[in-house]
Image (cartoon, grey):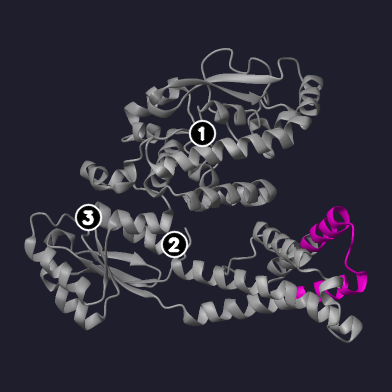
Amino acid sequence: MKSRKKQFWALILLVGDIIIVPFSYMVAHFIRFGNFNEISIKVPPVYLFWMTLGYITVLYFFDLYSLEESYLRLGVFINLISGVFVSAVLVSFINYGLFLEPIGRGIFVLANIFILILVFSLRLLCYYLFQHFRKAKRVLIVGAGRSGKEIFKIIRESQEDFFILGFLDDDPSKQKEYSTSDGDIKVIGGTDKLLEIFKEEKIDQVIIAASTERNPYLSENLLRVRMGGAEVLEMPELYQQIKGRIPINFIPDKWFLKAKGFDWSEKSGMVKVKRFLDILISILLLILTIPAWLFIALLIKLNSKGPVFYTQQRLGKNDKPFTLIKFRSMIHRAESELPQWAEENDARITSVGRILRSLHIDELPQFLNVLKGDMSLVGPRPERPMFVQEFKKKIPYYSLRHFLKPGLTGWAQVNYPYASSLEDSIKKLEYDLYYIYHMTLLLDLNILLMTAQNVLLRNKRKAIKRNAD
């Protein structure tokens, strides 16, 4: 998950690009002709709109709205050059192929040189400003038990800026040190010292990793700390911010009763709009892709014996079974016995099926499932009945993922693509519950964009699962 600071800087880059693209074409026109006369004819505003949108889209897919690495690094710089080049090819196609009145080659070449220089300069400047203004949050953890140790571990492994002062805990047996690369973090006192440490150490954030129900004095002091300007968060809240998933092993049952994200009903406006968009987008994409279905079917038949389509029973909303349809990507009767986990490099996948899976083309027929109302574009992926029954017995809160319709893609899929074990399924459930809790149309759009980005930049997918652990 991106922090608010990173989102702010990504927005700065976006606004900068929106200015840079038309500015570069106007400057190129001035250099080419020595004036701005007839600029609206040589570079019409409608051209600029579509071209700017094209540049932004391509730069997004090349992951160029991130400030994680310096743009002086060779690999990052080459990626930026590639992004601008592909953008230029795209807008060239838009001008020549759609408008049939292309911008002059001189203007086009000069403008893209300026775009490359300015886009690079903007990112380099923002990167150094971002690094300069980064300030580590001074954090205090209340509770040195299992929950406290886990959030301590998550904080230390994150790329966010935190400085952990230590733990507060009333249990004398927990007065031990936790070794880190920066020194030793230890229990520095009981909870009665909260206000004193807050004032002396200028704490920015207090993480509650222990129960406060039997300690009204602690609850009162936490409120004083909050009114004093510090952020007070419960452990699951910070965990969600950092990892983008809900830690099911570190939350009490009543947490779900208080959570407002688990009350979606068919009557809510959000769900109705979501359904309308599902139908609209599915119809449009079916119209665009159905002409290719015959070619895909031919490749499947030529590559291996068996039917073109593969159907399978899955469980949808409220555990209602439905028949999911896909293009067949495995050998015929790949599961002649018991159901098996599907792995990333599964030997049962055919050569054509591997291509279909890598581009997610095998899932195109599922737009029919969306139109029928069995699925949504975005939501938890539907599982097979046998696996669901097993998971319900072994994974707490697993049935909660069936509060919503399953999706073609989802928050779990873009953050943790493959599940090949029970442990993987637990992590994917945590992502699914996060999505249900935070579901908005904006999050759906973000997931769809991330899905497209992962398909186009498949090399990134290999790092997703590693970073999610």
In this picture, residue 412 sits left or right of residue 41: left
Secondary structure category for the residue under label 1: loop
Q: In the image as oriented, which residue stretches furthest toward the bottom?
A: 34
Residue 362 horizontal/vertical position (percent): 67, 31
The magenta region covers: 87-116
Secondary structure category for the residue under label 3: loop
Q: Earlier in the sequence, mark 3 or mark 1?
A: 3
Q: Earlier in the sequence, mark 2 or mark 1?
A: 2
**Residues at badges 3 and 2 in contact (C-beta under 8 Å)?**
no
Residue at label 2? 158
Residue 207 horizontal/vertical position (percent): 26, 63
Magenta region includes residue 113: yes
The quarter of the displayed image where residue 30 is located: bottom right
Secondary structure category for the residue under label 2: loop
Check the image and report above or below for 69 versus 305. below
Disc 1 marks which amino acid? Ser
Residue at label 3? 145
| Mark 3 and mark 1: Cα distance apart in space | 31 Å
| Front residue (pair 80, 404) | 404
The quarter of the displayed image where residue 370 is located: top right
The local crowd at label 2, few if under 14, some if 14 to 19, many if 20 or more residues have their Cα within 10 Å, is few
The local crowd at label 1, few if under 14, some if 14 to 19, many if 20 or more residues have their Cα within 10 Å, is few
Check the image and report above or below for 108 versus 144. below
Q: Give the residue at x 28% y 47%.
A: 259
Disc 2 marks which amino acid? Ser
Residue 190 visible somewhere in the drawing? no
Residue 166 visible somewhere in the drawing? yes
In this picture, residue 402 sits left or right of residue 235: right
| Front residue (pair 158, 384) | 384
Residue at label 1? 420
Q: Give the residue at x 14% y 57%.
A: 212
